[in-house]
Image (tube, coloured by chain):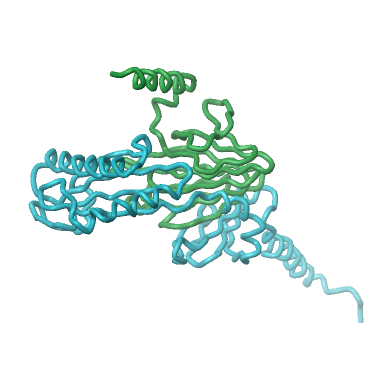
């Protein structure tokens, strides 16, 4: 192992050490768009959403006034939030080798969009989108969802 | 003749009053407190998918562009249709934050080998160009095989093909840390065949760029 590899490992070790629980969860996707007041919610804490940041199952995404977030999940599902919005990535399993798929999203408030990915295509019925008043079953679809508190 | 309505008429008038109060006019306000709005939008390429919106009180199906379900807690979903202006007003900001659509490439291999066909070799530059369009690059390389051989051998060959493509992409200048490599063996056939069938179209690597 050369010095730079060792350095990289140490840096990675320190970076992931703080949200310790997140390592045990499967990575679900990455933040591709983040502007204004935009946050990732993890283990009850709120941290600014960074471009390129990995998001995990059970993370939340939240925006304030003027904030926006766009995420692409590992199965090519895409999500976005407008200002004053929140959703939770309740469940994400994309393991084609084990034929194991699930995607559960909770739309908590504000305006969001959802563009289906491979999970909806490969496992019809494995996707569930929940709003406070309803459950949405998806068959390969682009949806816009608004929740007014 | 009396000016007062006969007593019998009042229930009917009350019913009309209730219908007006609870009917589509009032419920159509997009941001009524406690109300969820679900709008079906066209997919890329303008095809329209489908979705079902349900709760304990009922369900509606959305299968045309901008068909909309309005849902209040403990009430059955109501079907309506948003205008383009409604969509823009309520979802314009959210839509503008949607990341670019992922792109997929399929590269084919020679029989029982990790060597690309000539046409697929040329696609490497196209994959590279697509990746460079993204500010944050993610490239997922998935190896596939046909149904020849043991499960373990198929998984291994799929992985070998995926790694070979990864190396070509890194050689062409893509950052290796943005590339994820995996194999599914014969589990996701492009062309369904019986077991132990040589099928060139199943010997492939799918590259997702997003």
Residue sticking out furthest to the bottom: B1
From the image, state the color of chain A: green
Q: Which of B11 and B16 is in front in this view?
A: B16
Q: Quadrant of residue A22?
A: top left
Q: Residue at x 40, y 18 (%)?
A: A10
Q: Is residue B30 left or right of residue B53?
A: right
Q: Nearer the viewer, residue B103 or B187?
A: B103
Residue B105 locus on image (x, y percent): 31, 54
Residue A115 locus on image (x, y percent): 47, 53
Q: Residue at x 46, y 65 (%)?
A: B48
Residue sticking out furthest to the front: B172
Q: Is residue B66 left or right of residue B30?
A: left
Q: Which residue is drawn at 50% across and 49% down?
A: B99
Q: How many labels does the image show?
A: 0
Residue B149 locus on image (x, y percent): 8, 45
Up-down relation of residue A17 to residue A81 (above or below): above
Q: Residue at x 47, y 48 (%)?
A: A78
Image quarter hosting the N terminus of chain B:
bottom right
From the image, state the color of chain B: cyan
Q: Which of B188 and B40 is in front in this view?
A: B188
């Amino acid at each position: 192992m050369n010095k730079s590899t060792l350095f990289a490992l140490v840096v990675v070790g320190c970076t992931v050490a703080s949200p310790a629980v997140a390592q045990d969860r499967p990575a679900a996707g990455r933040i591709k768009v983040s502007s204004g007041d935009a946050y990732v919610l993890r283990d009850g804490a709120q941290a600014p959403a960074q471009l390129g940041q990995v998001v995990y199952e059970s993370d939340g995404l939240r925006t304030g006034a003027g904030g926006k977030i766009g995420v692409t999940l590992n199965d090519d599902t895409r999500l976005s939030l407008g200002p004053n919005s929140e959703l939770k990535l309740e469940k994400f399993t994309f393991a084609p080798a084990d034929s194991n798929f699930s995607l559960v999203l909770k739309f908590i408030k504000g305006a969001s969009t959802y563009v289906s990915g491979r999970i909806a295509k490969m496992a019809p019925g494995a996707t569930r989108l929940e709003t406070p008043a309803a459950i949405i079953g998806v068959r390969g679809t682009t949806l816009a969802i608004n929740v007014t508190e | 003749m009396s000016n007062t309505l006969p007593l019998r008429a009042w229930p009917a008038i009350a019913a009309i009053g209730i219908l007006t109060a609870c009917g589509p006019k009032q419920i159509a306000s997009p941001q009524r407190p406690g109300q969820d709005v679900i709008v079906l939008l066209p997919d890329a390429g303008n095809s329209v998918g489908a979705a079902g919106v349900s709760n304990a009180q009922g369900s509606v199906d959305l299968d045309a562009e901008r068909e909309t379900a309005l849902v209040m807690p403990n009430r059955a979903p109501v079907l309506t249709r948003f205008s383009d202006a409604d969509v823009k007003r309520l979802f314009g900001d959210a839509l503008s934050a949607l990341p670019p659509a992922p792109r997929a490439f399929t590269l084919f291999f020679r029989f029982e080998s990790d060597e690309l066909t000539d046409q697929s070799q040329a696609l490497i530059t196209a994959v590279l160009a697509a990746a460079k369009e993204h500010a944050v690059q993610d490239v997922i390389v998935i190896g596939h095989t046909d149904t020849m051989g043991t499960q373990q051998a198929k998984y291994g060959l799929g992985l070998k093909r995926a790694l070979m493509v990864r190396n070509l992409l890194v050689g062409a200048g893509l950052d290796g840390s943005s590339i994820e490599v995996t194999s599914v063996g014969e589990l996701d056939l492009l062309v369904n065949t019986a077991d132990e069938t040589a099928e060139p179209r199943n010997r492939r690597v799918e590259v997702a760029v997003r």
